[in-house]
Amino acid sequence: MSLLKDLNTLLEPIGIPIETGVFSKKPPDEYIVITPMSDRLDFFADNQAHSVIEEARLSLFTKKNYQPLKKQLTKILLNGDVTITDRQYIGFEDDTKYHHYAIDVLKEYEMEEY
């Protein structure tokens, strides 16, 4: 399993285009870009890796009110066992007319799953 795969699976039903890293097509009025941020091993007293912790940022871009989508994304992520570590309004982009809202997430995977 991987966080990118899990996020795409969880968010696909909302019908908003999702890409990783950068949106490569002509952007619609609403879209999400997932940026991987961290992929680390978690160690215990025996110095053996027992789990992998992956983190990513979901950047929501919308020309509409971002609040309903923020709430919907939050609910989907929490119900999908994804930990939300931060949420923040990045700002309104005057040149593109998009609101940019970021949600940082993480998920831990056992080494057997990885």
Image (cartoon, helix red, strand yellow):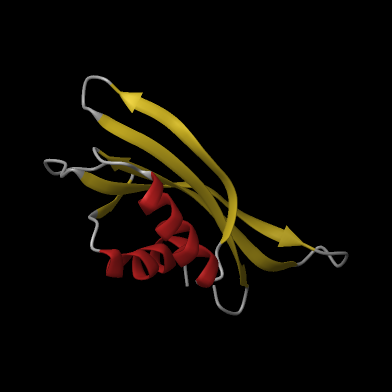
Query: Vertically, is 81 above or below 66?
Result: below
From this viewpoint, which residue is outermost toward the bottom? 112
- Asked whether, in this view, residue 85 is left or right of residue 11, the answer is right
Q: Position of residue 55 (x, y in %)?
A: 54, 52
Question: Which quadrant does the C terminus fall into?
Answer: bottom right
Q: Position of residue 56 (x, y in %)?
A: 49, 50
Q: Position of residue 39 (x, y in %)?
A: 56, 53
Q: Residue at x 42, y 50 (%)?
A: 70
From this viewpoint, which residue is outermost toward the left? 26
Q: Nearer the viewer, residue 113 or 23?
A: 23
Query: Vertically, is 18 above or below 96?
Result: below
- Asked whether, in this view, residue 1 is left or right of residue 46, the answer is left
- Asked whether, in this view, residue 43 is left or right of residue 110, the answer is right
Q: Residue at x 22, y 55 (%)?
A: 17
Quarter of the image for residue 60 reads top left
Q: Residue at x 41, y 39 (%)?
A: 101
Quarter of the image for residue 63 reads top left
Q: Residue at x 34, y 26 (%)?
A: 92
Q: Position of residue 57 (x, y in %)?
A: 46, 46
